[in-house]
Amino acid sequence: MDDVKFDEATQKELTTFLEREQAQARINSTVHNLTSMCWDKCITGTPGSRFARGEESCLLNCVDRFLDTSLFIIKTIEGQRSQQS
């Protein structure tokens, strides 16, 4: 394959595109992990047309805690980065 050279604007556009795609992949992976983790933790029986009362509240709490923890970690990392700058 030929050695293809892109101008600076095209390189920047490609970099931005790749960063967005990687961010989307991380989000999809996080959602998958969250779904799997909370499902395994909270769904105890064979799923029917509705969740049992305890299963529903467990799922809500699991998702809430996961989101709280994720936000805490992001804020902590952002704080550390700003202190290093």
Image (tube, grey):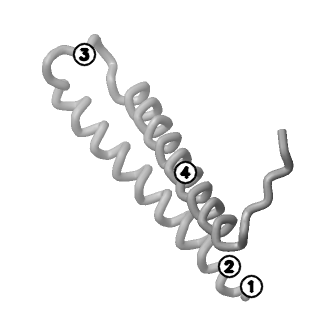
Residue drawn 65% across the image and 85% down it: 82
Is residue 21 placed above or below 52 in the rendered structure?
A: below
Q: Amino acid at mark 4?
A: Glu
Secondary structure at numbered mark 4: helix
Label 3: element kind: loop
Closer to the camera in the image, 67 or 14:
14
Residue at the (55%, 48%) spot, across then down: 26
Q: Nearer the viewer, residue 58 or 74?
A: 74
Q: Is residue 2 left or right of residue 44?
A: right
Mark 1 crowdedness (10 Å alpha carbons): few <14, some 14-19, many ≥20? few
Q: Residues within 10 Å of mark 4 (few under 14, many from 20)?
A: few
Residue type, mark 3 in image: Pro
Query: Alpha carbon of mark 3 to alpha carbon of mark 2: how far?
Result: 44 Å
Question: Where is mark 3, residue-wise?
Answer: 47
Residue shown at the point (73%, 62%) measured from the top left: 6
**Residue 84, labelled with which disc?**
1
Task: Look at 53% across and 72% down and name the residue there.
Answer: 75
Q: Secondary structure at mark 2?
A: helix
Q: Are the residues tagged 4 and 3 within 8 Å (C-beta)?
A: no
Distance CA(mark 3)–CA(mark 1): 49 Å
**Residue at label 2?**
81
The quarter of the picture where the N terminus appears is top right
Residue to which mark 4 is pinned? 21
In primary-sequence order, the first of circles 4 and 3 is 4
Between disc 1 and disc 4, the foreground one is 4
Categorize mark 2 by other alpha carbons within 10 Å: few (<14), some (14-19), many (20+).
Answer: few
